[in-house]
Image (spheres, rainbow, N blue to C red):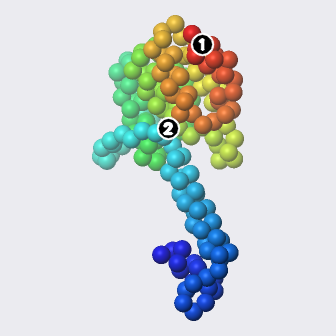
């Protein structure tokens, strides 16, 4: 219908029939709008998680859980943070907290949650450039690709397949190649 209305508006005559150029322009216009909608839909992540809509914890409560020495509290904090990020909450201050307190952990559950978090978190600033913190993330990914445990290397390679930021992938190419040749 939208295409028909656009054709009629562009002066295709009394019966609504228009020339090929007007139809072509209308199709291109609809196609551009569709591309914008698809780009917005693909912005974040390739997974869907259920989130309970009760009162979400605030940023300070999540920070306390992430800074805890207990692995289970860190796991709960990461789950909450990922759920909030997927539901549109923006918490850029917690990125450095995650890098400082969760990245050094060797727990497999935390490693998997960390990879999901890297997928969900905004990697670029408002200007479209890569955040400076992503250099630390890139270093962590390189360490995981060089990890003696093949499970961690495999999970990291699977995550890198989903990554679209070339600035993060470029320094990892030699390590990725050595993993694929292994």
111 versus 118 height, above or below: above
Of labels 1 and 2, earlier in sequence is: 2
Residue 67 makes an appearance in the image: no
Q: Is 31 left, or right, of 87 in this rendering? A: right
Q: Is 25 left, or right, of 99 in this rendering? A: right
Residue that numbered label 1 is attached to: 181
Give the alpha-carbon distance from disc 1 to disc 2, as whole Å.
29 Å
12 versus 176 height, above or below: below
Quarter of the picture containing the C terminus is top right
Identify the disc placed on residue 127. Answer: none
Q: Where in the figure is residue 64, as x and y percent of width and height? A: 43, 28
User: Mark 1: few, some, or many residues within 10 Å (few <14, many ≥20)?
Assistant: few
Q: Quadrant of residue 78?
A: top left
Q: Where in the figure is residue 9, as x and y percent of width and height? A: 59, 84
Residue 23 makes an appearance in the image: yes
User: In terms of depth relative to the viewer, which is nearer, 157 or 89?
Assistant: 157
Q: Residue at x 49, y 18 (%)?
A: 154
Q: Residue at x 48, y 32 (%)?
A: 117
Secondary structure of residue under mark 2: helix
Residue that numbered label 2 is attached to: 120
User: In terms of depth relative to the viewer, which is nearer, 177 or 53?
Assistant: 177
Q: Quadrant of residue 50?
A: top left
Q: Which numbered disc, 1 or 2, marks the residue closer to the eye?
A: 1
Q: Quadrant of residue 72?
A: top left
């Amino acid at each position: 219908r939208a295409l028909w209305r656009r054709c009629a508006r562009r002066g295709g005559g009394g019966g609504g029939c228009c020339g090929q150029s007007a139809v072509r322009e209308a199709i291109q216009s609809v196609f551009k709008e569709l591309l914008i909608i698809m780009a917005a839909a693909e912005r974040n992540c390739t997974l869907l998680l259920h989130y309970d809509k009760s009162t979400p914890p605030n940023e300070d409560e999540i920070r306390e859980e992430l800074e805890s020495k207990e692995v289970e509290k860190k796991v709960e904090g990461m789950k909450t943070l990922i759920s909030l990020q997927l539901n549109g909450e923006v918490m850029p201050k917690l990125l450095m907290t995650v890098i400082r307190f969760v990245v050094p952990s060797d727990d497999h559950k935390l490693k998997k949650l960390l990879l999901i978090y890297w997928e969900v978190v905004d990697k670029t600033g408002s200007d479209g450039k890569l955040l400076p913190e992503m250099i630390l993330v890139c270093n962590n990914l390189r360490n995981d690709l060089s990890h003696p445990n093949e499970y961690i290397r495999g999970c990291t390679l699977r995550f890198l397949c989903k990554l679209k930021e070339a600035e993060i992938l470029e320094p990892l190419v030699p390590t990725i190649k050595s993993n694929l040749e292994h």
